[in-house]
Image (cartoon, rainbow, N blue to C red):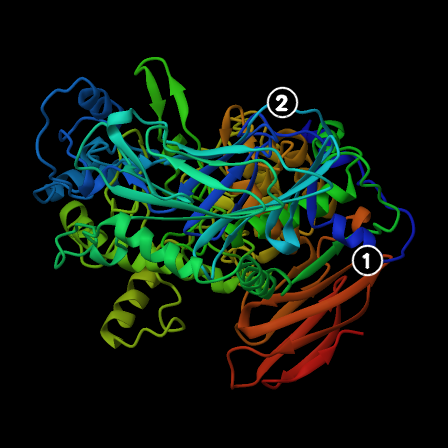
Amino acid sequence: MLVQLLAISAFVASGTTLASAASLSSLHSIWDDTWAEDWYTQYYVAGNGPLGIAVSSNPANDEVVLNLDTLWQGGPFSPYVRGMDFFSQQQTLLNNINVTQNNYTGGNPTEPLDPSILKGIRKEIMTNGNASVAALQTGYDGYGSYSTPGSFFVSRVGNATVSNYKRSTLFQEGKIQATWTEGKVNLQREYYCSYPTTSCHIHTNSTGGKAPATVNSFFTARPPSASNITCLSSSSLLYTSSADPTITEGMQFSFIAKVTVTGATTTCSSSTGAISISAGATDVFWSIVGDTQYDINKGTRETGYTFSNGKDTAAVAKTLIATVDALSASQIAAKHASDWSALYSGFELVLGDISEISDTKTTNASIEAFTWEKGDLLLENNVFNYGRYLLISCARGTLPASLQGVWSIYTYDDTISGYDLGAPWGSDFHADINLPNAACTPILLEQNYWGAESTNLGSLTTTLWDLVQKTWIPRGTETAALLYNSSGWVVHDEMNPFGHTAMKGGFDVASEWFILRGAAIAGETDQAFLANVANKLANMDKGAHIGSWGQLQEWGALDIDEPTDHHRHISHLYGMYPGTSLAAWNASSPSKSEIYSAVATSLQARGNGTDDSNTGWGKMHRAAVAATLGNATYSHNLYKYAIQENIVGNLFDHLGSIFQIEANLAAPGVVLQMLLQSHSSLSPQVVTLLPALPAAWSTGSISGARLRGGLGVSMTWANGKVTSGTITYDRGGPAARVVEVYEAGVLKKMGTLAFGESWSLV
């Protein structure tokens, strides 16, 4: 398959006409003609950061799966037995076995590690390239998992024949829409989560006759004794429970759902915990709010690492719903539209000549028919735009986008005769291989933020830096001292929101240190610290060695790589993307051309991402590295191959029975790397236009792209060449920048770009 991907040319779109307004809208939406049944492959999602929803849009029994970004099991909210893994802890609790009181330490040992142990591990790594680090690991003590609170159902009373059904996710509007007909009644239902009002909404309109009666209720996925649903009024329900229903000490949360109805009456039953709406409603507007006890500002030694605000979540929810209730449905919708548009419309991309594209097939049908050999311009644009839609939907809560964004689902587990409320990998925060945003930031989670800065969504990184500052650094400082006898701070591969900075069990590789190479640029003023960093860096191995078969060596100076190793990770190529240490290589030995050749050899040897787990994120990382190398055909083919192998009908990045959001959120960064590159903001700043442009995208346009150094780029191209555009220096400043602009290896423009100035690109 690798040879085929390298050899087959990309599908070439005919014509050079840019998209019409009608076809542009199809780039920013997905749709289906039947309601969803499977959460992983069919449900459509929306969110505002604190809240997330996934909806089936089933006219008879519409499920709205609810999520709260801070609802977690484990940590200081749950008792546990030290040394017992999380799943064993849960079974112990379910069996009503007494456990010790919470003594959560972020995974850190209680005593410093014997320095001789670390010295031995380091020696083994330098000798063999790997080592057992069991002595550094402390298991899963209290690590926990992201938890699902349950669902809200809108259930029709009686039967009806449904026709003219359609549901869509509208990226530009930040909402989901479903329309259908029952007899003579036409119904439209919209779902969205408003960031300004911290609320989610279900809005149903009907015309042409009487809408059916509905019963509306929460489904807790918990034992009745573990949750409480009460009527606050004839039109509002309060639902309160715990992230972990097996214990009483778990993190508490509350939801309130309140409805405003035109043309019908509402009644609430305390015995059933449901609100009934009589037949005849012409307008039904549900507002849903919720919150937890999590407090990211309580994660320090001074606050006892409680991560708890200690508040009554029901009271908090009542305050939230009162604020929402003071606004009309149209006012809430207007606030949402304004807020969403300010983010989403700040960037526009058209890939290829899409004037003749057809959107008559459902997105699911298009996905099923998709092959990497042929491609599909509509889907290739959709996947890019969906990545931006998802990031806006999930990155503005208290916590940043996790391994599943903000979305998760409960699943029934026969072994516990109940619902598993957790998520694969805990839906936690990984910092292992694909860390930074390609624009400027040195520490980012997996691939989730690759396209944030470059597609003008840099404001969405705030919660990420909060996580680092408020949960990684306090505990990480203790981890550095206890495990490594060092000052500074350290984190390892996986983190929860409770400052778990120690090394979890199950890994036999050494820990990763985050070294701030750009300390001075980042504003560090401690001169002693800067001098110490500079001294350490000067004595470190530069990390780039070319091996016996022309490869970039993965294990530093050790030439032990196997040319048949198709491991899903390509961590040693990190410096090509999302890092820049290899992409901007300026040493003479080895030379830049030798480094690029070694990277290309290693990339080809690692395969196309199929053999080891067949992950979408593995293919996306390979595509980005290929783009940095200037290999347009291979980069594009890998992008399409990820769509073929890993993207499903709701455009989720799907692996078997698991949702992994990394490929979704990585897609914008990968595509931008094919179209626009600048690996350093140091003078002169080199900007390359269309560095790896696929033949199928020979026509297109970008508006609002961002580069390092405060630069912005907008441009159009046809027949593979830039036809119009500008580069603007409008952020940062005020010092002027020396800039060189290249296209197809030819210097197009060079000089000093003043702050506030723009250059034409033609």
Kind of residue at badge 1:
Ala
Q: Secondary structure at mark 2?
A: loop
Image position, residue 672 (x, y; %): 64, 55
Quadrant of the image occupied by residue 736: bottom right
Image position, residue 247 (x, y; %): 19, 30
Q: Is residue 161 above or below residue 334?
A: above
How many C-alpha atoms fall within 10 Å of the one at disc 1: few (<14), some, or many (≥20)?
A: few
Q: Which residue does the numbered mark 1 point to in the structure image?
A: 21
Image position, residue 321 (x, y; %): 38, 54
Q: Is residue 265 above or below residue 729?
A: above
149 or 162: nearer the viewer? 162
How many C-alpha atoms fall within 10 Å of the one at disc 2: few (<14), some, or many (≥20)?
A: few
Residue farthest to the right, as pictured: 15
Whether residue 175 is visible: yes
Q: Residue at the spot x=40%, y=54% of the render?
A: 397
The quadrant of the picture occupied by the N terminus is top right
591 sits left or right of 247 in the view: right
Image position, residue 538 (x, y; %): 34, 63
591 sits left or right of 86 in the view: right
Label 1 – label 2 distance at C-alpha: 40 Å
- Say which mark, if any, is on residue 159: 2
The quadrant of the picture occupied by the C terminus is bottom right
Q: Residue at the spot x=64%, y=63% of the render?
A: 345
353 or 265: nearer the viewer? 265
507 or 363: nearer the viewer? 363
For discs 1 and 2, the disc positioned in front in the rendered view: 2
Please tell me which of labels 1 and 2 falls first in the chain.
1
Kind of residue at badge 2:
Asn
- Say which mark, if any, is on residue 731: none
Q: Residue at the spot x=44%, y=50% of the render?
A: 435
